[in-house]
Image (spheres, coloured by chain):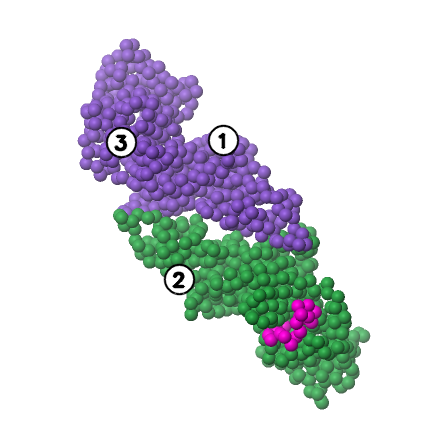
Chain colours: A green, B purple
Amino acid sequence: MNRRPLAWLQTLRLDPPSPSDKTADRDRLRRALLQAGYPRVSFPLSVMRRLPDEMRRRDFELTAVLGQAEDEVRVIDIGREKVHGIALDIGSTNIEASLFDLSTGDRLDQGGRENPQLPFGADVLTRVQRSMMGGTEELVRVLRTGVNGLIDTLCSRNHFAADDIVAVAVAGNTIMSHFFLGLSVDNIPVAPYVPAVNGPVFTTGREAGLSVNEGALVYVFPNAGSYVGGDIISGILHAGVHREEEPVLFIDVGTNVEITLGCRDWIMTGAGAAGPALEGGVAGIGKKAEPGTISGVRIGRSNRGIDLDVMDNREPTGICGSGLIDLVSEMFSAGLIDQSGKFTGIGEGFRERDGERLYAIYGNGNDGLSISEAEIRNFLFSKAAMFSFLYVFVKSVGLTFRDIKKVYVAGALGCGIDPESAVNIGMLPDIPRDRFIPIGNSSLSGAEMLLLDRGLLDEAARVAALITYREMNEDAELMSVLQGALFIPHTQPELLKGA
Amino acid sequence: MNRRPLAWLQTLRLDPPSPSDKTADRDRLRRALLQAGYPRVSFPLSVMRRLPDEMRRRDFELTAVLGQAEDEVRVIDIGREKVHGIALDIGSTNIEASLFDLSTGDRLDQGGRENPQLPFGADVLTRVQRSMMGGTEELVRVLRTGVNGLIDTLCSRNHFAADDIVAVAVAGNTIMSHFFLGLSVDNIPVAPYVPAVNGPVFTTGREAGLSVNEGALVYVFPNAGSYVGGDIISGILHAGVHREEEPVLFIDVGTNVEITLGCRDWIMTGAGAAGPALEGGVAGIGKKAEPGTISGVRIGRSNRGIDLDVMDNREPTGICGSGLIDLVSEMFSAGLIDQSGKFTGIGEGFRERDGERLYAIYGNGNDGLSISEAEIRNFLFSKAAMFSFLYVFVKSVGLTFRDIKKVYVAGALGCGIDPESAVNIGMLPDIPRDRFIPIGNSSLSGAEMLLLDRGLLDEAARVAALITYREMNEDAELMSVLQGALFIPHTQPELLKGA
């Protein structure tokens, strides 16, 4: 396989200087790079400073770490044996990172942590307001500290020094990309909603303030506007939407539902608030995917016994988005809730506490895990928002669900959504189940792909250019579809098939 | 006049964002720069960070400071009203700088100081050896401190902040350019004599460690090899050697004599050690041009009275190179020294002290200024070296002095050489006097020209490529010409006319 990572080792066998060839060191390296097929090369002075010794130490067989920065090749470092890179997904809630050996393409490690901006507001807009009131520096600093902490963890766990990281590919939504780069977000929430930058950014470890090689090539995915960030573009790249001949759907569910519909000729993206319910944000027991999280639920139709899938087979401590979809679907099918999500009171497990109606999922009494009726209604709002966005979105381009041959489901639906359950409650359309393709954290996966294949730089730019943003809340039909979607599966079930 | 300085202010009237044009700030600036004729533009992240506020503060009429870095335009800074630049000549002995308003082309100030590396050795090779023995960092640091001190002085004297300096053009010999950039000189004195860099260097204020704008465009002239540095290329640019149809001579006299002969089709440069005598380095009374320096001498043919030109009409405290040429010429013409430089003892003013034979130039006794016979012999060696280099150099390309229509005399001949005196003692060839054109510190002047005209970047590169270096000490004829040249004017006076 022909590897073309974002940064790579180039071994150059230089002609040693001689009385008949007194070409200076930098100019000799430049000549060798030209011969190797790199006509446009930039050198930081710091590399030039180490060049004479390094050339001679290696007897003029020099290994240079090169990086692709737009149409130019940058000499990132010299004299390294190995090159490592990091793919970063900076989400509003979580930061995820993967560590790669760029010479083999192997993923060496992966890790994540909460976005340290969370205490400033779970909602991104709260953080933007904080920034506009003079908090930019602090928000930028805590995020950078968090990112560097994650990088440091990955490096020390694998016995690498910061200098060993020579490339970083970063995907995040528009706000997060801005905070990451230390750019102002102040104009994003104000009409006409203009970010500081949409195009891709190529910068260095030093300029970005990362604890990596100071010359490291740091690439930040382009945004397609204030509402369509690099995370979506990275996800589209990963799913390959832009290579499809027929339109496919790409759904990224987090705090927002982001829907992309398109193919190689056009891509339309829209986003809408769906509440945090789908991202494990259910008040009482919501949890992200980690050991102890309930990721699947089955309830017996006759005895109403509950069977739980718990990650790592541990004592359950919470439930993630896909577990919640299962739970609601099973409760509905077992007759524990009605179409509107109200508790039927049939069977055991129901009780009341402080006027709140609860249903026990695990254990009994106060030590167990329960879900409240209000939480289920809250969840139904999220599922209604998601379905109605989907319906209106697909219809607006003259298609119906039946026309869609692939539906990529990405994002924080934690442990992997079960399409059967999602269709059962009317969250996803009623099409053949094998058309649903779960793709996990596609934003991180896209960043990983690009880190390992610089040929995708052009593709990312092409995707960004293809995308048109569609304002979804302006649609007149949305409200009527949404109201019906508050019920399970829908007051007009034919809409699930795309009527 | 169409100004094209190395860095310039570009006022861009940007279309304000609107619902129909949500182009992001950086991308909007990039588009405007493209429309203004700059297709290749690079932005440091630090500029991007200030862009959103600056654009809006100025109601989308943005002033950007642009700089030419090879074939790319760099956004150095934004939101400045004025742009200033510094031309630097880094000589082995002295550092000279000029401060310019780049928008008007006016020279605002000029200053100089001793090269703070002098205590490490007056001779450059001593410093190189020191560097090879582990002293690089210290040599680099003291030079940088000196350069920054000079820049700070110019800035504070003119009430500028460091940030106001957005461009720096630097000329120096190969060794000095390397020290300035923090590059290793270790391989320069060792066969095959390969510098770290010969091509031009475009870097930033920050990378170069200068107390100027961190994004300032810092340009360092190319070298044409270990022995032909950016100072010569800058001087050639200033004199315009590379534009001449017929060959002209360009002589730069410092610690070394550097001779360039050429025209638009070819340029040949050679250098040879001539001792420090011509650079005001006469042991006792030598001095660089400054108030109190004797720059001209006349001695009455009959009464042998001495008439001195003293800079600023102050009490004389020393004599510079051109004053010394006058002095020796006049002493010879007045019969005070013979052909070999020996004191004749005729007339007053001669005395002995501690076995040293002295001649009083100013005042009497121990408080005055005297020159010793040994100093004159020392000077004659320098003049002999210079003449014989010139003779051999011109002859080697099949020309004689008569063929040379212009002789540019540059460098440390301090206060401006008197060709009549120089010809009289056989230092310069006996050709019509109006062919000698004194051009002072041509290295600084060339850097100034380039600072004010980025069109010269290509010319500097062309000059560097045109130059061939000629090793002068290898010439068999040199020694015989030099021996005769130790006498005034020469044992074979016909050689002065280029026989």
Magenta segment boundaries in residue numbering: A389-414
Q: Which residue is mark 1?
A: B107
In which image quadrant can residue B450 be found?
Answer: top left
The three-letter code of the residue at mark 1 reads: Arg
The three-letter code of the residue at mark 3 reads: Leu
Q: Is residue A76 visible?
A: no
Judging from the image, what secondary structure is the residue with disc 2 in? loop
Q: Which residue is mark 2?
A: A81
**Location of residue B272 in the rendering, given as x and y in whole percent from the top left corner:** 28, 35
A492 above or below B470?
below
Tell whether B223 sits left or right of B377: right
Circles 1 and 2 on the same subunit: no
- Residue at (58, 64) in percent of width and height: A233
**Location of residue A137 in the rendering, given as x and y in whole percent from the top left corner:** 62, 52
Kindly report the distance in space between the C-alpha atoms of the residues bearing marks 3 and 1.
34 Å
Kindly report the distance in space between the C-alpha atoms of the residues bearing marks 1 and 2.
50 Å
Of the image marks 3 and 1, the number of the one nearer the N terminus: 1
B22 above or below A434?
above
Q: Between residues B397 and A85, which one lies in front from this camera angle?
A: B397
Kindly report the distance in space between the C-alpha atoms of the residues bearing marks 3 and 2.
52 Å
Q: Which residue is mark 3?
A: B390
Circles 3 and 2 on the same subunit: no
